[in-house]
Image (spheres, grey):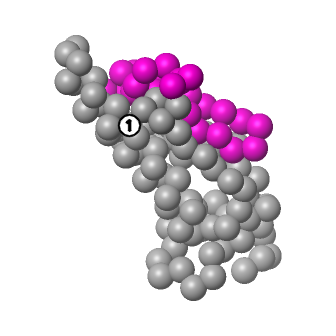
Amino acid sequence: MSDLDLYFAHQKTVQTIHGVTIRYRLALIGPTVTVVHSEIDETLPEHSVRITTGDAELIVDSASWIDRRDELDAHILTWLLDHIDLRAARPRPAARRYDELWMNAWREANPGRR
């Protein structure tokens, strides 16, 4: 794999992860999720992304996910759902459009709440 291929794979990884976390933030006010990539934090391995929430941390190596963007999206979403306490979240007031997946997960974690 060329350096250019790895660069573009890393950019797609960063975009995918930010897409999942942005949909969370647009739908819910809840536990903090932080995303940092190796261009910002030099302590990370090259071409990697760190996601943290609470005490949990996931480091994603971009090279491992080349041509698997849909799988990465599902992997990140599953990891976040396993590590975010949605009972501590609430729907974002006056959101124009809620992400249905996040809202369904919130409703499941909070039966009886609106």
Which residue does the numbered mark 1 point to in the structure image? 13
Extreme-top residue of the structure: 1
- Which residue is painted at 57% across and 69% down in the image? 27
Q: Amino acid at mark 1?
A: Thr
Q: Nearer the viewer, residue 75 or 112?
A: 75
Label 1 neighbour load within 10 Å: few <14, some 14-19, many 20+: many
Residue 72 placement (x, y as % from top left): 43, 37
- Which residue is painted at 56% across and 23% down in the image? 43
Horizontal arrangement in the rendering, residue 54 relative to residue 27 (left or right): right
89 in the magenta segment: no
Element marked by disc 1: helix
Question: Which region of the structure is painted magenta?
Answer: 42-67
- Which residue is painted at 63% across and 82% down in the image? 93
Say whether residue 60 is visible: no
Whether residue 29 is situated above or below residue 39 in the rendered picture: below
Q: Nearer the viewer, residue 46 or 53?
A: 46
